[in-house]
Amino acid sequence: MIYNKEKKVLYSAIQPTNLMTLGNYLGAIKNWVKLQDEYNCFYAIADLHALTVTQEPADFRAKALSLFAQLIACGIDPDKSLLYFQSHVPAHAELQWVLCCNTYLGEAYRMTQFKDKSQKHAENVNVGLLAYPVLMAADILLYQASLVPVGQDQKQHLEISRDIAIRMNNKYGGIFTVPEPYITVGGARIMSLQNPEAKMSKSDTDVNATVELSDDKDTVIRKFKRAVTDCGAEIVAREDKPGITNLLNIYSETTGKTVAEAEKEFEGKGYGDFKLAVGEAVADKLAPVRAEHARLLKEKSVLSDIIRKNGLETRAAADRTLVKVYKKIGLVPKDNK
Ligand code: TYM
């Protein structure tokens, strides 16, 4: 990364539980790409976070590597931004411990994602699931990030990260930059194509609910043709029309047109024509990403070089904050100075 002192730091991450969905792309990754020139950007594959669910090792490793290449294919420029694996930087887990000691159990239990996930995976409610947002706070605070582009579902985790930072700043004197979330309106919550009341999720078992970035044109169009819509025939964004509203948002975020412009464009048209047009717009957007992803996956040594180089550079940046934190809280420095 070309570190520029004049620019602030931006941080975000994505879990490699699966490859990217259209929700991940429109909610977060599109903004990661857009903000690369304005900030010093750190982007992580949050592989440690993904361990809260049992992963099949070979499949997990393959998905993480493929996601790394997919992010580059989406436009994350490895010369501009530090794209790296969270597990390659030990300071994340080290800072997490310190932050855990400054987080109340009540705060952690209150997280809606903890409640949802403990219900969904009742057979495996592990300590990691509860400490999950504290690891997120460690990710962000390690790099003194000012801005964190995420989808709406991560807003509460950003709030707890801010609370922990402010608490520690008050206790020990300015240690951390207090981060702000960056959440755009239209893409913040892309919903499932089969149930517009639920967010589009990597882990959905209904293949028609989720558009994957790696889906080919026919698959994308088929999924949009099957998308659940609402009663009536009007193509307008309204609370009582969650299916159509979701499709209008997807169309707007994909084409750059506003929702109002999209409503006008489809005035008087039927749902069938509209769904086809959304599918085509999305498929056209994804085609070059898909081709570039496939090309990059063959460039194994190029990817390995980026992974090695970025791991080193990120470790150095993270250690600077960790040394500062250890000193502030009263641990004996390694060189005892
Ligand atoms: P993850 O992997 O679930 O999702 C990655 C990003 O995609 C956004 N997102 C969505 N946005 C709009 N509509 C959707 N349907 C949708 N689904 C997902 C997420 O909000 C996220 O921005 N815990 C995080 C990863 C993480 C992280 C961090 C993020 C780890 N450390 C530090 C920010 C800062 C997660 O599981 O994201």
Image (spheres, rainbow, N blue to C red):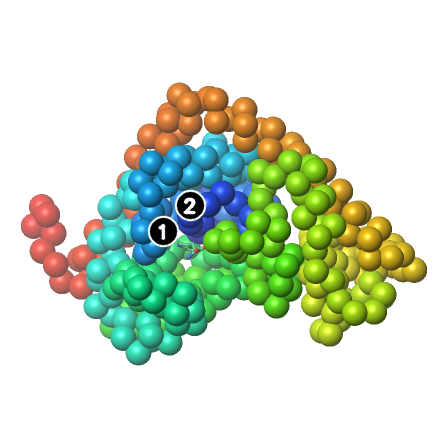
Q: Position of residue 215 (x, y in %)?
A: 61, 39
Q: Quadrant of the N terminus?
A: top left
How many discs appear? 2
Q: Position of residue 139 (x, y in %)?
A: 35, 54
> Is residue 259 depicted above or below 312 in this figure?
below
Task: Tell me what residue is drawn at x 47 percent, y 63 percent.
Answer: 154
Task: Tell me what residue is drawn at x 27 percent, y 75 percent.
Answer: 105
The answer for how far apart the CA atoms under marks 2 and 1 are is 7 Å
- Observer-nearest of 157 and 78: 157
Secondary structure, mark 2, is loop
Q: Quadrant of residue 132?
A: bottom left
Where does label 2 land, which residue? 16
Q: Work out whether residue 11 can be spotted.
A: yes
Where does label 1 land, which residue? 50
* Left-right relation of 134 to 12: left
* Left-right relation of 225 to 84: right
Q: Quadrant of residue 65?
A: top left
Q: Position of residue 157 (x, y in %)?
A: 42, 65
Answer few, some or many: residues within 10 Å of disc 2's Cα (few below 14, many 20 plus, some between 14 and 19): many
Callout 2: CB less than 8 Å from ligand 1: yes
Dot 1 amino acid type: Ala
